[in-house]
Image (spheres, rainbow, N blue to C red):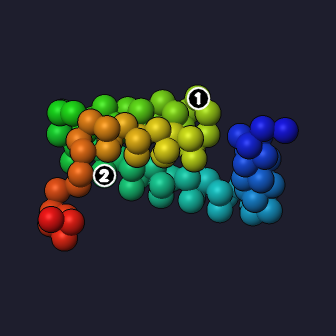
Amino acid sequence: MGMGLLLGAGIAALFAAFPMAIVGAMMLMVGVKLFAFARELRFDRSLVSVGATVAGSVVLNMAAGFAAGLVLHYILLGRPEGNDDAE
């Protein structure tokens, strides 16, 4: 069994443990928070990593989308800004 199927079944079982009204409210709050974040995005190279995260999450699963966005972010943008401790 693939890791994606294992994680998908686990999250489905977790959602089944809660009433649908609570799951719906949690999903609504997540959507509101993601929309607030998306409004602050600039149209530059960082948008590519956000797109990779969304595409990977929709096609595969959330963990794969997060990993794809993280890897692409560091490939495109290099070392994060404000991290001067490494010098």
Q: Residue furthest bottom?
A: 85
Q: Residues within 10 Å of mark 2 (few under 14, many from 20)?
A: few
Residue placed at 15% from the left, 65% from the top?
A: 87
Q: Would residue 62 be found to the left or right of residue 43 on screen?
A: right
Mark 1 secondary-structure assignment: helix
Q: Earlier in the sequence, mark 1 or mark 2?
A: 2
Q: Which residue is mark 1?
A: 59
Q: What amino acid type should be assigned to the residue bearing mark 1? A: Val
Camera sees residue 12: no
Q: Residue furthest right?
A: 1
Residue placed at 30% from the left, 51% from the top?
A: 37
Camera-nearest residue between 46 and 54: 46
Q: Where is residue 45 shown, x and y percent of the image? A: 21, 33
Q: Residues within 10 Å of mark 1 (few under 14, many from 20)?
A: few
Camera-nearest residue between 56 and 80: 80
Number of the label disc, if any, that sits on residue 36: 2
